[in-house]
């Protein structure tokens, strides 16, 4: 059956949004009506079901975040902020639900654990509502998952100012082994996309989000479609895709969230510590020619690039 929903997240999120505040109200009622154990058990059951619903919404949200494709950097950052807030709410609600179930089972009629858990439940509800507010902003302010043309990504002006030995966008690039092409600016949080025509190139090609001795990059092998997402600290996630003759490769490194895209579709998604500022660009390891149609960078540029990195072709 067809549905207008872009993913499951908006369908399941209403379960915790309804049940968690209801559980708080039932907890308060159970404290007032201590001579009616039915209300105590009902409150505990509502907390447990609300926690399960919160977990389902969180898992559906993770899938939804990977399904929306490449977003502008500031929107991607808002998506990651919502994910972090939702995870914190999930943990708080889970702790309260476990405590509430234990209190109902092990300490029937004892007031102090129920009063403490009532306060904790109120705090968990606040965290849930803050996460929900961020989720609403993603839809109603940023238009995430709304059926509309994709937002334009601002082209980085530094892309036309490569150092000696580097190749500007729109040019042919020939590789015989490893070659690295970097823009002349260092970025902290950054999103990089490159559209390339592969022609007779065979090997690995990727977009670099932070250049270092071990590059942070999203790389795909044109020979078998294997894909690897890495930070400068090491490999984060692997996947696969089937790039066509012309392909858009993209990567984002926003705080602790890292993603790799092929033609706007999320292929890899990982998490690690935020990167120090570094230069983004294009990386090749193979033989043959490509044509660099465009290279676009969007993000925070806190400082000029260190000339010691070089940035010329290897």
Image (cartoon, helix red, strand yellow):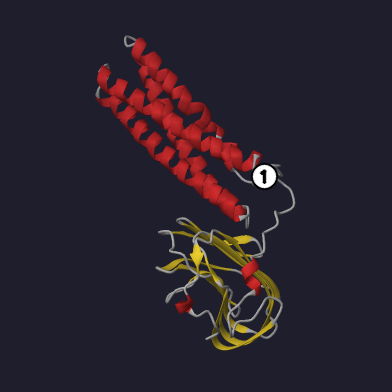
Front-most of 179 and 16? 179
Q: Position of residue 253 (x, y in %)?
A: 51, 60
What is the crowding at mark 1: few (fewer than 14 residues within 10 Å), some, or many (at least 20)?
some
Please give left or right for residue 269 compared with residue 152 in the image.
left
Front-most of 22 and 86? 86
Please give left or right for residue 243 compared with residue 57 in the image.
right
Numbered disc 1: secondary structure: loop
The structure residue drawn at horizontal position 25% and vertical position 26%, both measured from the top left corner, is: 106
Residue extending furthest right?
Answer: 149
Q: Which residue is mark 1?
A: 143
The structure residue drawn at horizontal position 60% and vertical position 69%, both measured from the top left corner, is: 241
- Image quarter of residue 123: top left
Q: Position of residue 149 (x, y in %)?
A: 74, 52
Is residue 260 visible in the rendered structure shown here? Answer: no
- Image quarter of residue 236: bottom left
The structure residue drawn at horizontal position 32% and vertical position 9%, both measured from the top left corner, is: 35
In the picture, which quadrant includes the N terminus? top right
Q: Position of residue 92 (x, y in %)?
A: 38, 36
Q: Say above or below: 303 vs 135.
A: below
Q: Position of residue 300 (x, y in %)?
A: 54, 58
Q: Say above or below: 275 vs 244.
A: above
């Amino acid at each position: 059956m067809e549905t207008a929903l872009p993913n499951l997240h908006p369908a399941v999120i209403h379960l915790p949004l309804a049940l968690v505040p209801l559980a708080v109200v039932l907890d308060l009622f159970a404290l007032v009506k201590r001579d009616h154990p039915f209300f105590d058990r009902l409150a505990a059951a509502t907390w447990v079901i609300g926690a399960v619903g919160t977990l389902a919404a969180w898992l559906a949200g993770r899938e939804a975040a990977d399904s929306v494709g490449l977003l502008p950097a500031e929107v991607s950052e808002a998506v990651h902020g919502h994910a972090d807030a939702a995870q914190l709410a999930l943990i708080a609600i889970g702790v309260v639900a476990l405590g509430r179930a234990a209190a109902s089972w092990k300490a029937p009629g004892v007031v102090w654990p129920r009063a403490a858990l009532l306060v904790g439940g109120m705090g968990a509800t606040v965290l849930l509502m803050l996460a929900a507010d961020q989720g609403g902003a993603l839809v109603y302010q940023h238009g995430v998952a709304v059926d509309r043309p994709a937002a334009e990504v601002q082209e980085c002006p530094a892309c036309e100012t490569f150092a000696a030995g580097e190749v500007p966008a729109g040019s042919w690039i020939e590789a015989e082994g490893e070659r690295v092409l970097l823009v002349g600016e260092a970025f902290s949080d950054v999103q990089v996309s490159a559209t390339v025509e592969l022609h007779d190139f065979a090997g690995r090609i990727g977009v670099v989000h932070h250049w270092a001795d071990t590059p942070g990059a999203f790389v795909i092998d044109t020979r078998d479609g294997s894909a690897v997402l890495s930070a400068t600290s090491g490999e984060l996630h692997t996947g696969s895709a089937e790039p066509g003759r012309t392909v858009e490769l993209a990567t984002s490194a926003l705080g602790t969230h890292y993603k790799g895209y092929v033609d706007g579709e999320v292929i890899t998604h990982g998490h690690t510590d935020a990167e120090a500022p570094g230069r983004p660009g294009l990386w090749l390891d193979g033989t043959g020619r490509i044509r660099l149609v465009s290279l676009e960078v969007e993000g925070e540029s806190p400082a000029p690039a260190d000339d010691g990195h070089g940035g010329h072709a290897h």
